[in-house]
Image (spheres, rainbow, N blue to C red):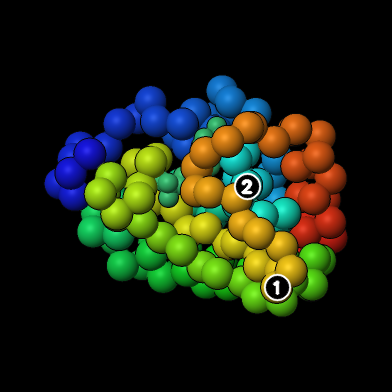
């Protein structure tokens, strides 16, 4: 997918927003959704997406981006408070060559522990939905 690609309303995150695919939700309001990554790079790997249709950083309106970023900070604070990692990486990829695999803009919140190896990006075995819901509940409790 190039940086100028058209938004596909059938992408996985659009289906999650529409409730067609289950997700372990952490936070939702009328503008954003926070939920657990199904192929987590670490325990607590959370995604934050806007409810507007935008493939990447270049097609989202500044006001929606601002709100998305602030909500990412709020949710990242809850991840920090719930899981006490040694560090937290915030990531956002634009275009396939840059590592983007789902073309609905999102921020990754990836907790990092010094003594734990991170799993690869968007790969491996899908996590158990009940385990993800348990972690989501811990994060939600800190919001
Ligand atoms: P990107 O590669 O576009 O930056 O990130 C997409 C993320 O979505 C990846 O980290 C991947 O693990 C995650 N992902 C892919 N499919 C699903 C899914 O069906 N449900 C959830 N919750 N996450 C997904």
Q: Residue at x 46, y 63 (%)?
A: 91
Query: Is 101 rendered above or below residue 119?
Result: above
- Disc on the earlier residue, 1 or 2: 2
Front label number (1 vs 2): 1
Q: Which residue is mark 2?
A: 40
Quick one: 119 or 40, which is closer to the camera? 119
Asked whether, in this view, residue 93 is left or right of residue 12, the answer is left
Q: Residue at x 70, y 40 (%)?
A: 24
Q: Residue furthest bottom?
A: 86
Label 1 SS: loop
Quadrant that contains the N terminus: top left
Q: Are the residues tagged 1 and 2 within 8 Å (C-beta)?
A: no
Quadrant that contains the C terminus: bottom right
Where is residue 101, by image quadrant?
Answer: top left
Task: State how far apart marks 1 and 2 are (Cα).
Answer: 17 Å
**Image mark for residue 50:** none
Instruction: Judge: label 2 CB < 8 Å from ligand 1.
Output: yes
**Image mark for residue 114:** 1
Is residue 17 visible from the viewing direction of this image?
A: no
Query: Is 130 rendered above or below residue 135?
Result: above
Mark 1 Cα shell of 10 Å, populated few (<14), some (14-19), many (≥20): few
Is residue 25 visible from the viewing direction of this image?
A: yes
Residue 93 placement (x, y as % from top left):
36, 56
Query: Is 68 rendered above or below residue 19?
Result: below
Residue 139 placement (x, y as % from top left):
78, 59
Residue 113 placement (x, y as % from top left):
71, 69
Q: Residue at x 41, y 70 (%)?
A: 66
Q: How many marks are shown on the rendered structure?
A: 2
Residue 33 placement (x, y as % from top left):
57, 49
Mark 2 Cα shell of 10 Å, populated few (<14), some (14-19), many (≥20): many
């Amino acid at each position: 997918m190039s940086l100028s690609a058209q938004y596909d309303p059938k992408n996985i995150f659009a289906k999650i927003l529409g409730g067609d695919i289950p997700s372990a939700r952490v936070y939702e309001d009328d503008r954003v959704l926070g939920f657990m990554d199904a192929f987590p790079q670490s325990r607590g790997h959370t995604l934050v997406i806007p409810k507007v249709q935008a493939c990447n950083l270049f097609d989202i309106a500044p006001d929606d981006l601002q709100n998305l970023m602030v909500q990412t900070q709020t949710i990242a604070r809850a991840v920090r408070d719930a899981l006490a990692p040694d560090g937290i990486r915030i990531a956002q990829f634009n275009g396939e060559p840059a590592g983007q695999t789902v073309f609905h803009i999102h921020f990754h919140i990836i907790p990092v522990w010094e003594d734990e190896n991170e799993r690869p990006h968007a790969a491996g075995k899908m996590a158990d939905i009940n385990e993800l819901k348990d972690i989501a509940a811990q994060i939600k409790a800190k919001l």
